[in-house]
Image (cartoon, rainbow, N blue to C red):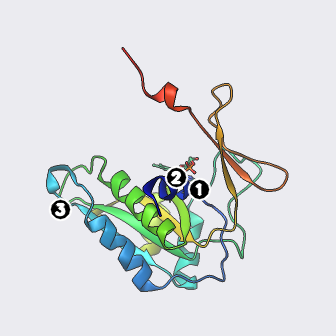
Amino acid sequence: MKLKDLVFRTRSYRRFDESHLIDNKTLEDLVALARLSASGANRQPLKYLIYNTPVDCERLFPSLIWAAYLKEWCGPGHGERPTGYIVILGDKEIAEGFGVDHGITAQTIMLGATEKGLGGCMIASIMKDKLREDLNIPERFEILLVLALGKPVENVIVDEIKDGDVKYWRDEKGNHHVPKRPLNELIIKL
Ligand SMILES: Cc1cc2nc3c(=O)[nH]c(=O)nc-3n(C[C@H](O)[C@H](O)[C@H](O)COP(=O)(O)O)c2cc1C
C-alpha cells in the first residue's frame, strides 16, 4: 500500500469485531516497528505491555475514556470492544521525560496495524491510577498511552473542516466523520 493510502486509512476506530482475536505475534511485530522508531538522544526509554486475551482485555477496558465529543456514547459495547492492547510506558530509570517519543511510536504502530488489516485508537484519557493497580504496573513506569486495537467495524469519513469545528461526529447511518483542516491552513507564511 502506498504511504499516502496507509496514512489515509489509519484513522481512529473505536468499534471492532470482538470475535476477531489478535495473536501475540501480531502485537510483537507491531512493537518491533516501534523499536525502529526515532527517539530523542536515542535514549529509547519506552517499554510496552501487550494484551490479547479476553480476560486481559476486560481488565483494561474500564480504565479507558472514549470519544469525548460523542456525548451520547459511552464507548464500545460488548461485541464491539478491542481485542488487543499495547500500553506504552516510559521507564523513569532510563529518562526523566519522554518528549514526543511515544507519539512517534504510537503512529508507527497504528500504521503497522492498518497494514495488517487492523485498526484502533490511541487513548491518552486513561484512569491511570486504576490501570496501574489493575495491571500491577510498578511506579518506575509512567503510563503514557494505550493503543486499543481490533478489526474495525466502523466506517470513517474524512471531511474538510467547516466553520473551524474540530469535533468528530456520527451521522444517522453510524458513519464516523472526522473533520480535517485544509492544507492551505496548515502551511503558513510569516
Ligand atoms: C495523543 C492522542 C490522544 C488521544 N486520546 C484519545 C482518547 O483518550 N480517547 C479517544 O477516544 N480518542 C483519543 N484520541 C483519538 C483522537 O480523538 C483522534 O485522533 C482524532 O479524533 C482524529 O481522528 P483520526 O485519528 O481518525 O484522524 C487520541 C489521539 C491522540 C493523537
- Numbered badge on residue 65: 1
Residue shown at the point (62%, 56%) measured from the top left: 66
Judging by the rendered image, the residue that carries numbered circle 3 is 93
Q: Where is residue 128? Give x, y as percent.
A: 45, 59
Report which quarter residue 94 is drawn in.
bottom left
At which x and y percent is residue 185? 51, 25
Residue 110: x and y in percent read: 46, 62
Residue shown at 67% from the left, 65% from the top: 15
User: Disc 3 and disc 2: Cα gap in Å?
Assistant: 24 Å
In the depicted structure, whether residue 139 falls above or below residue 134: above
Left or right of 158 in this view: 27: left
* Marks 2 and 1 close (CB-CB < 8 Å): yes
| Residue for badge 2 | 125
Name the foreground residue: 137 vs 54: 54
**Residue 108, image x, y percentages:** 38, 60
The answer to which of marks 2 and 1 sits earlier in the sequence is 1
Q: How busy is the neighbourhood of tag 2: few (under 14 within 10 Å), some, or many (20 plus)?
A: some
> Considering depth in this image, is 111 or 170 the residue closer to the camera?
111
* Left or right of 141 in this view: 130: right
Residue type of the residue flagged with mark 1: Ile
Q: Is mark 2 within 8 Å of ligand 1?
A: yes
Q: Which of marks 1 and 3 is nearer the N terminus?
A: 1
Quadrant for the C terminus in the image: top left
